[in-house]
Image (tube, helix red, strand yellow):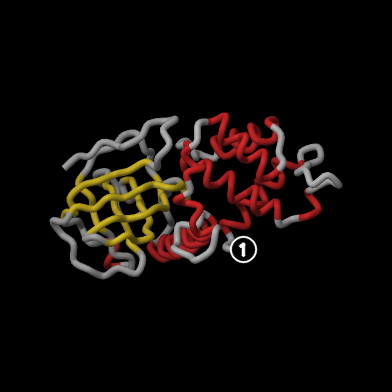
């Protein structure tokens, strides 16, 4: 059944898709990446590959969502919503599955061969794992691991900025630049964007040469954007 996305731009929660798991063409299983096909319709999320969390049968699992028409396999296929759940092997046809979108990994693309596609899927999985780690989705007994549940993520805009200012010694101009940069990277929802902002600031905090003598975070001309680019590249390569 169709389940409307739970947020629109500006809401403080991840996008969410929910629907019944239905039978598909089993193409993912044939190439080593079984997927759960969700029966739903959502035009607010564009075609592509996303990372997030799947909820099914009382379990919460890291997962990837592919939205699109699978152009590498065949032309003219219908748009589907397919979830590849990591470390999960249960048969869940007919069950309800919910997927929370936390970040976008890449656009949909037609590959030259199935081998090229499977190579990219393996890369997608590694990117997702790295981002999950960076975004502290996995349960850990550290303060960073509890960040996802922090009420700071749900503060009004001004209060969230003031909290970041106190924690990381950044001015409003730097904060706005970081926020806008992540927004331009397709992190349209506030909740996911704020997780990236905090992860980036924490990463910069560990890089002491970015702080001046008064312990304030500073960047030179063009330094902030370059640091953001390097941060996302490091995540995509699994270096963070």
Instruction: Give the residue displayed 67% in from the left and 51% down from the top.
Output: 230
Percent x, y of residue 20 = 17, 50
Q: Is residue 109 left or right of residue 95?
A: right
Percent position of residue 178, x then y:
63, 38
Q: How many marks?
A: 1
Identify the residue at horizontal 68%, vertical 45% (top origin): 168
Q: Residues within 10 Å of mark 1 (few under 14, many from 20)?
A: few
Q: Which residue is mark 1?
A: 239
Q: Quadrant of the N terminus?
A: top left
Q: Nearer the viewer, residue 26 or 125?
A: 125
| 180 to 207, vertically: above or below | above
Pick the front one: 62 or 112: 62
Q: Quadrant of the C terminus?
A: bottom right
Residue farthest to the left? Answer: 94
Residue 124 located left or right of residue 24: right
Horizontal side of residue 164 vs 9, given as left or right: right
Q: Kindly indicate the quadrant of the structure image that contains residue 83.
A: bottom left
Coordinates of residue 129 in the picture (x, y in percent): 48, 62
Q: Secondary structure at mark 1?
A: loop
**On the image, which quarter does residue 181 sit in?**
top right
Side (left or right) of 233 relative to 58: right
Q: How far from the left and from the top, in percent, is residue 223?
A: 76, 42
* Above or below, 160 relative to 29: above
For the point 54% across and 36% down, which residue is it?
A: 183
């Amino acid at each position: 059944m169709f389940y409307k996305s739970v947020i629109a731009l500006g809401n403080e929660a991840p996008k969410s898709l929910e629907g019944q798991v239905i039978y598909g063409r089993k193409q993912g299983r044939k190439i080593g990446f079984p997927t759960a096909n969700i029966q739903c319709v959502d035009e607010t999320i564009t075609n592509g590959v996303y990372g997030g969390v799947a909820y099914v049968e009382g379990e919460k699992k890291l997962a990837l969502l592919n939205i699109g028409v699978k152009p590498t396999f065949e032309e003219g296929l219908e748009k589907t919503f397919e979830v590849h759940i990591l470390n999960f092997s249960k048969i869940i046809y007919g069950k309800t599955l919910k997927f929370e979108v936390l970040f976008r990994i890449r656009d949909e693309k037609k590959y030259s061969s199935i081998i090229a596609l499977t190579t990219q899927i393996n890369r997608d999985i590694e990117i997702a794992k790295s981002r999950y780690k960076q975004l502290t989705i996995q349960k850990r007994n550290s303060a960073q691991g509890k960040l996802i549940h922090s009420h700071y993520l749900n503060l009004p805009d001004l209060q969230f900025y003031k909290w970041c200012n106190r924690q990381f010694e950044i001015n409003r101009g730097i904060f706005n630049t970081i926020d806008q940069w992540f927004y331009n990277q397709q992190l349209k929802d506030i909740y996911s964007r704020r997780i990236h902002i905090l992860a980036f600031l924490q990463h910069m905090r560990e890089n002491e040469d970015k702080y001046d003598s008064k312990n304030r975070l500073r960047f030179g001309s063009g330094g902030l954007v370059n640091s953001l680019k390097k941060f996302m590249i490091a995540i995509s390569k699994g270096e963070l």
